Amino acid sequence: MREMFTPIQIILVCAWMWGFTVIGMSVQLFSYGVAVLHGFVTGLIMGDVATGLTVGGTLCLMGLGVGGYGGSSVPDYAMGTVVGTVFAIATGGGVEAGLATGIPVATLGTQFDILAKMCGSFFIHKQMDCVEKHQFDKMGIWAHGWNIFRATLYTLPILLVMTVGSGIITTLLANMPLWLTKGLNTAAGMLPAVGFAILMKYLPIREYGVFMIFGFAAASYLGLSMVAISMFAFVAAYMVYKGLEKGNTAAAAGNGGNYDE
């Protein structure tokens, strides 16, 4: 499989994933459509932008509406896009080959995310110790060290599949011990519930909880897609926004009149 990719391609693809992860943790410019961006850049490196965009767009649609809220772990479709794109182009198998290799890697990305967050507690405690000792320069070093560690951890699967082959990912998932799989799946299943609980704590549920109930009923009982529910949500949000805007304008006009008097 080594002959499928040139050393330059391996270096550029891994450098892109590593650099994007480091910058993405700090700048947070690309929160949506990341899979499409990865598909474009990876396709550019591999010499087939069209295939890269197709694979990235397909995996982006698969992850539409899926987010790691409140610390929950979800499939890493960005990582899957990079791997899927390089193998779709290198093998000439098209989108099918890209999905066959990209989806297992995206699934494996969930476990890497859990591992990264577990290791992140070590870096956080080191930063807290530095704060207590007023060693702010060291605190910054530990903060940047966490970004570098996380980026390196996320780049490892891509390096492995480009140097050894996609079979290693499928073999790893198939031969993973049952106790480890159950443990990771249990943790991954609990984190979304905790994440949504945290998210709901900061949402104005008392005022707008009826919309949440409507969205749940639309998805569970009416079987509406995420796109349809999002359109209803946009209409509801727009109506609420205009109502609040009208109320604030009236209140401001009333306060202005009292001030003039």
Image (cartoon, rainbow, N blue to C red):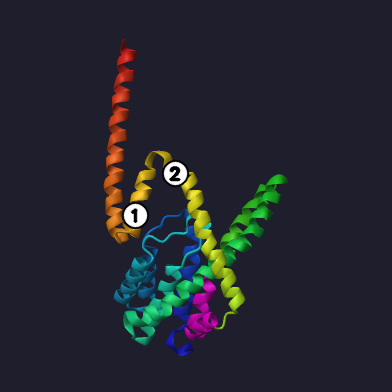
Q: How far apart are marks 1 and 2 (CA)?
A: 19 Å
Q: Are marks 1 and 2 in contact (CB under 8 Å)?
A: no
Say whether residue 178 is visible.
Answer: yes
Percent position of residue 214, x then y: 33, 50
In the picture, measured across the screen, residue 73 lies left or right of residue 48, that is right
Above or below — where is 212 with respect to 1?
A: above
Q: In the rendered structure, does residue 11 fall within the stretch colored magenta?
A: no
Part of the protein shown in magenta:
154-174
Q: Which residue is drawn at 29% across and 45% down?
A: 236
Percent position of residue 191, x then y: 53, 59
Above or below — where is 256 with respect to 155?
A: above
Instruction: Give the structural element (helix, strand or loop) at label 1.
Output: helix
Residue 46, quarter of the rendered image:
bottom left
Task: Name the outermost residue toward the front.
Answer: 221
Percent position of residue 212, x then y: 37, 49
Between discs 1 and 2, the one toward the N terminus: 2
Percent position of residue 95, x then y: 33, 79
| Residue underneath mark 2 | 203
Above or below — where is 191 with respect to 153?
A: above
| Residue underneath mark 1 | 217
Q: Which amino acid does label 1 sit on?
A: Ala
